[in-house]
Image (tube, coloured by chain):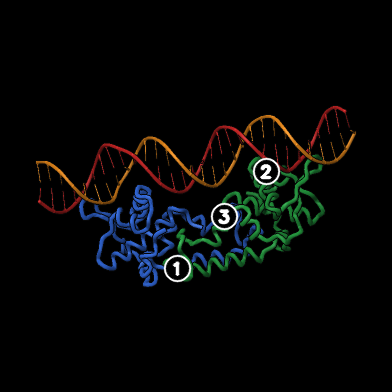
Chain colours: A green, B blue, C orange, D red
Amino acid sequence: MFSRACEYAIKIMIYIAANEQEGKRTGLKEVTEAISSPEAFTAKILQQLVKNDLLLSFRGPSGGFILNDKKEIRLHDIVVAIDGTHLLNDCILGLNECSSANPCPVHDKFLLVKNQLTESLLSTRVNDEALLKGKNSLKN
Amino acid sequence: MFSRACEYAIKIMIYIAANEQEGKRTGLKEVTEAISSPEAFTAKILQQLVKNDLLLSFRGPSGGFILNDKKEIRLHDIVVAIDGTHLLNDCILGLNECSSANPCPVHDKFLLVKNQLTESLLSTRVNDEALLKGKNSLKN
DNA sequence: TTAATTTCGGACAAATTTATCCTTAATTAG
DNA sequence: CTAATTAAGGATAAATTTGTCCGAAATTAA
């Protein structure tokens, strides 16, 4: 459904959010360990999340990442930042001309699914109680 | 959502089903033209659909493909044949240990979406009236 | 039987995604 | 100031997906 990079990104954000709840800033190595992801690749994803204003970064000893809580970050923001809007906006068969006015054969069948998905992503914030509780279930 | 190959596969199956409604067998070149897909790649996908018993193939002049209508073919069959069951069965964050007994942080949030998706794929047959009408909307 | 047509299938190539390596820049603590 | 620490970022490599090429096998029609 999501790219591997996006899966990591969601885990990263949940972990950092949970850490922040306890007043802690999170470093690359720590999050890499927490979600068992490849370190260098994880670094790239963290960079993207910073560029997209979802995280703030700090270099040097005691550096690391925190949420950019100017915004209430939703799963939707993360998915769009990493995978773009294709999954949510484009035709499920990859057709350029597909729209409700000019639908592809399966357009209507998948409207509900896509709306449901978009709604789930929009309504879920990374600092939801329910998500933070699961911060130890992010390995493997 | 689906791989490019799977998008092609769905279009292929709908097109062949529509052709069959008119008693016509469908060849590689025709379907390639109808859905504007790369010919050699499309040939590989057709082979996979044959191997997975969704299509029957015939060589030689006036050869081509028809549905293996021993089964009522659903979108679900096509997706599983080409992309496997990962999308439908696996954890959305890629976790091995995720289940309703031991859920990842977003497990519950996506249950509904995944069930909706599975239901849509299971309940849609390639020879549905609604799909066949759109057989000319499969280009680009 | 021969030639044309069409799928089959293996090898290969291009593009994209995932992942690694290494140097630089910034920051902190001593 | 110096040394240690941590993120930034460019280059490259590995893996996967997408796409191509071409000869072989099967079938049909003349």
Q: The C terminus of chain B appears in which quarter of the rendering?
A: bottom left
Q: Amino acid at mark 3?
A: Phe
Q: Position of residue C3 (x, y in %)?
A: 15, 43
Q: Amino acid at mark 1?
A: Pro
Q: Mark 1 or mark 2: which comes first in sequence?
A: 2
Q: Position of residue A102 (x, y in %)?
A: 44, 69
Q: Which mark is residue A43?
A: 2
Q: Name the residue that disc number 1 marks.
A: A103
Callout 3: residue from which chain? A
* Residue under the point 75% across and 45% down: A27
* Residue under the point 65% across and 54% down: A10
Q: Which mark is residue A2?
A: 3
The Cα–Cα distance between marks 1 and 2, rounded to whole angstroms, is: 41 Å
Callout 1: residue from which chain? A
- Judge from the rendering whether residue A2 lies leftward or rightward of residue B80; answer left or right: right
Whether residue B108 can be seen here = no
Front disc: 1 or 2? 1
Callouts 1 and 3 in the same chain: yes
Front residue of B5 and D12: D12
- Judge from the rendering whether residue B107 lies leftward or rightward of residue C12; answer left or right: right
Callout 2: residue from which chain? A
- Judge from the rendering whether residue B84 lies leftward or rightward of residue A40; answer left or right: left
Q: Quadrant of residue C23?
A: top right
Q: Position of residue B11 (x, y in %)?
A: 39, 60
Instruction: Reply above or below: A98 against B5.
Output: below
Q: Quadrant of residue A42?
A: top right
Pointer 3 local density, CA inside 10 Å: few below 14, some 14–19, many at least 20:
some
Q: Contact, CB < 8 Å: mark 1 with mark 3?
A: no
The Cα–Cα distance between marks 3 and 2, rounded to whole angstroms, is: 19 Å
* Numbered disc 3: secondary structure: loop
